[in-house]
Amino acid sequence: MSDMPDKTVKKTNPWAWIPTLYFAEGIPYVMVMIVSVIMYKRLGISNTDIALYTSWLYLPWVIKPLWSPLVDILKTKRFWIITMQLLIGAGLAGVALTIPASRFFQLTLAFFWLLAFSSATHDIAADGFYMLGLSKHDQAWFVGIRSTFYRLAMITGQGLLIIMAGFIESSTGLPNVDIQVQAQPSAMVAEALNPESIVVTEQEGPLRLLASSETVAIDVAKRSPEEVDAILETARAWNRAQGFYAVDNSTTSTEAGEVPPSWWQRNVVQKVEATIIDWFGPEQQAEVESNDQVGNVGAVFLTLSGPVPPGENIVVNFGRESGDTSIQLIEGERFTFTEANWNKPLMAVIQLDLKLDASSQAFFRARSGNIPLAWSITFYVLAGLFVLFCVYHRCVLPKPASDVSKVHQQVGDIFRESLRTFASFFKKERIGAMLGFLLFFRFAEAQLAKLASPFLLDAKEAGGLALTTGEVGVVYGTVGVLMLTLGGILGGVLAARKGLKYWLWWMVIAINLPNAVYIFLSYTMPSNFLVINIAVGIEQFGYGFGFTAYMLYMIYVSEGEHKTAHFAICTAFMALGMMIPGMISGWIQELVGYQRFFVWVMIATIPCFIVAGLVKIDPEFGKKEATNGEPAEA
């Protein structure tokens, strides 16, 4: 290609299309990989299913090099950009439309797959068009601009959109209800825990949540396991029968006895689960099983003051806000009021720790909101934005003379050349060490990334920090992205001075050791929002600094005749390295809990140190070379 752009390109100022093109490239990726995790957590999907199925969404980026020749052969890059933006808009609208559906998990996943494939194809076309639509001088000049707007897309997706969803959640919800639970010696024991005896009548005034009592006193006296189990089963049976729990949208759970375990389940999965629990599971199980007494329980009933509007629902999250962690909610964490059950009481059960024998207290809060509506609106807004992108880019994108269909060429020759390029990558010297580095450098981070947001959102009874949706948007979308960017900039500046080899081990340490902040958070359970932000900021800064090594290494191993194609293969292995560990992370967490899962994440950093020691890097590589390109999808 000539150093001068095509004459048709001169008619369009690059500032008119580069910022919007790379903003549009970043948004669908962050929605598929990051925002989907938060959305599914707020909609009540299990961590196992969230991690497994959202990790599968990496697949289009894994196999992207396989169909990139088709994008190059068929039609023009401009055509692919406009078409994919239209498909992305349709996919976003599809997610918004199916969120309120009864089988929303399966339906929204199908549209997320459409988004993933459309986004990966859009990446191929946009990056190719960037080289066709600009002179080499302009390509170098605008590389920082495209990087900036790609990062702005990250901030918008991880921050502003999540904050917007959180705002809609809270604005569509009812006023919070606060309940004080007191553990007292010789407190009056409420024997009547029969929810059928509670009559709910419509009250005047605006719709609101009501509690049977603002203060609940529970005697610290011990009770037999049989008594507590009976109360708990009464509550669960009542709550299920009244429809307070949404239809189970998980794809891994079945009713007990419905499907007998398969050979694989009996001989592999169950044995692996037993081993993981033996190594990392809670230690107190045997003690509880051998004890003939357990902590006492109390109940609180939550109702509505009036009917729910037809077709709407009110999701309530109930959990401990502060106070003694020995007082825990064991039933009624999340439930839904509808027009069918508004006049029935939700029975929540709170239990004292067996060792608690003195006066203490904890404060619980019930928050409500129309969560499906909030996320539907968020995705509809994005769908409209991408329709505008499609129309805008159809009018504004230049038409380079070199951007033409190549169907007139021999398709077989093009594919044979693609296969030769692909094969030449695997003929590189020390390919085994290269692949090990690409696959295992982020082995721990891939698992942490899928469970960090669920940990922040989960109730304290489940081991989480009980942040709101908007608070998570602030943590990751503002503080997190800022620190991630600063870490990446510092990594690039330092690597340009002394090279990748000099800084490799410092970057390996930076991307791994700050993960320990999640051990700190899970064991201390801070309520101070500033402390949480500082901890996440430290981890994100370390990740940004350490990820520089990965980006530079991909550039290093791609050097040669087929630099662009080999770099694309590297990014495919990077996506594979994120996909596979992420798939099992939720399953591990649900087996062992958040605290021990984060300990496991630290153990999982060991492969990164091993593969870093196996690679060979030219000491001069990276010196005086800026890494200004936008980060590959991470």
Image (tube, helix red, strand yellow):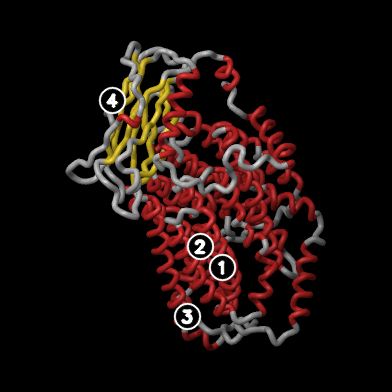
- The extreme front residue here reads 196
Instruction: Please tell me in which quadrant of the rendered image residue 342 appears.
Output: top left
Which residue carries the number 4 mark? 215
Q: Is residue 392 above or below residue 354?
A: below
**What mark, if any, has residue 118 been given in the picture?**
1
Q: Nearer the viewer, mark 3 or mark 4?
A: 4
Identified by mark 1, the residue type is Ser
Q: What residue does disc 3 label?
A: 394
Closer to the observer: label 4 or label 2?
A: 4
Image location of residue 367, percent across then percent down: 34, 41
Identify the residue at image location x=59%, y=60%: 626
Q: Give the quarter of the figure containing the C terminus.
A: bottom right
Picture coordinates of residue 40 (x, y %)? 48, 49
Amino acid at the residue labelled 3: Arg
Q: Earlier in the sequence, mark 4 or mark 1?
A: 1
Residue in view at x 22 percent, y 42 percent: 202
Q: CA distance from mark 1 to mark 3?
A: 17 Å
